[in-house]
């Protein structure tokens, strides 16, 4: 609208800020509203699917942990049973070694004594703890020890048991006996 007293000038309606703001933002909101709504829907769906996937993974982990705990318990039970069996067999073998009327000993492949029974201790007048780790050469005169080692080597090389007549020096004098030697289970 033109102003009469001022040619070329036009009258502009001055509006308050709220009206101007609404007129400017309304087209933007109308255009961007569906886009924002679509973005929110996509974000919501993404969160939903990620949550489902994470939940499935947690369930799988829990199942794997449960299975692991079950296997560990079975292994502990199996281990306890094996320990019980070992103790039982050890007690049985110890009883046999202790009360056997024969001399029984176990040697390493290198000829060191690992164990001797009570009959060995009684016959040779040597305690188990004084024999363990020693060889025949540490305990007997060379001529006897050499023959003992030869027989040990025959058993080890042949991987089979042998029976030989051995002569040994005892505190009471020289004695001859029939020795049965078997290859050890240790490799």
Image (cartoon, helix red, strand yellow):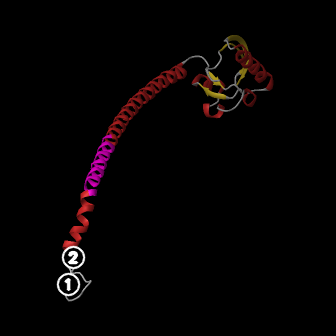
Residue farthest toward the right in the current orientation of the protein: 143
Quadrant where the N terminus sits is bottom left
Magenta stretch: residue 37 in it? Answer: yes
- Image coordinates of residue 60 in percent, x first then y, are 35, 36
Residue at the image position 45 percent from the left and 29 percent from the top = 83
Q: Quadrant of the C terminus?
A: top right
- The earlier-in-sequence mark between 2 and 1 is 1
Tell me the SS state at disc 1. loop
Q: Residue furthest bottom?
A: 5
Looking at the image, residue 59 sits to the left or right of residue 163; the answer is: left
Which residue position holds label 1? 3
Give the magenta part as a residue range: 31-52
Was residue 152 drawn as part of the magenta stretch in this picture? Answer: no
Q: Nearer the viewer, residue 158 or 5?
A: 5
Residue found 31% across the figure and 50% down from its top: 43
In this view, the residue in front, 27 or 154, is: 27
How far across and down, in percent of the image, does residue 146 sit?
A: 78, 22
Q: Can you give x and y, in whole percent of width and height, for residue 143 in the image?
A: 80, 22
Q: 179 or 57: nearer the eye?
A: 57
Q: Residues within 10 Å of mark 2 (few under 14, many from 20)?
A: few
As measured in the structure, the alpha-carbon distance from the residue carrying label 2 to the one carrying label 1 is 24 Å
Which quadrant of the view contains residue 145? top right
Q: Nearer the viewer, mark 2 or mark 1?
A: 1
User: Which quadrant of the figure has residue 108?
Assistant: top right
> Is any atom of residue 174 visible in this view?
no
Query: Is residue 126 positioned above or below 57 on the image?
Result: above
Is 47 drawn above or below residue 33 in the view shown?
A: above
Mark 2 highlights which residue? 17
């Amino acid at each position: 609208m033109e102003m009469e007293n001022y040619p070329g000038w036009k009258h502009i309606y001055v509006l308050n800020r709220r009206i101007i703001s609404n007129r400017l933002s309304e087209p933007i909101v109308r255009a961007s509203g569906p886009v924002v709504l679509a973005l929110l829907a996509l974000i919501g769906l993404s969160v939903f699917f990620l949550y489902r996937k994470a939940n499935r993974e947690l369930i799988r982990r829990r199942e794997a942990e449960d299975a692991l705990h079950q296997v560990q318990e079975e292994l502990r039970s199996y281990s306890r049973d094996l320990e019980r069996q070992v103790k039982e067999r050890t007690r049985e073998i110890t009883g046999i070694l202790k009360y056997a009327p024969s001399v029984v000993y176990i040697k390493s492949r290198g000829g060191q004594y690992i164990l001797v029974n009570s009959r060995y201790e009684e016959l040779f007048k040597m305690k188990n703890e004084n024999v363990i780790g020693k060889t025949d050469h540490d305990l007997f005169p060379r001529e006897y020890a050499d023959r003992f080692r030869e027989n040990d080597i025959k058993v080890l090389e042949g991987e089979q048991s042998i029976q030989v007549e051995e002569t040994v020096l005892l505190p009471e004098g020289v004695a001859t006996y029939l020795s049965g030697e078997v290859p050890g289970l240790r490799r």
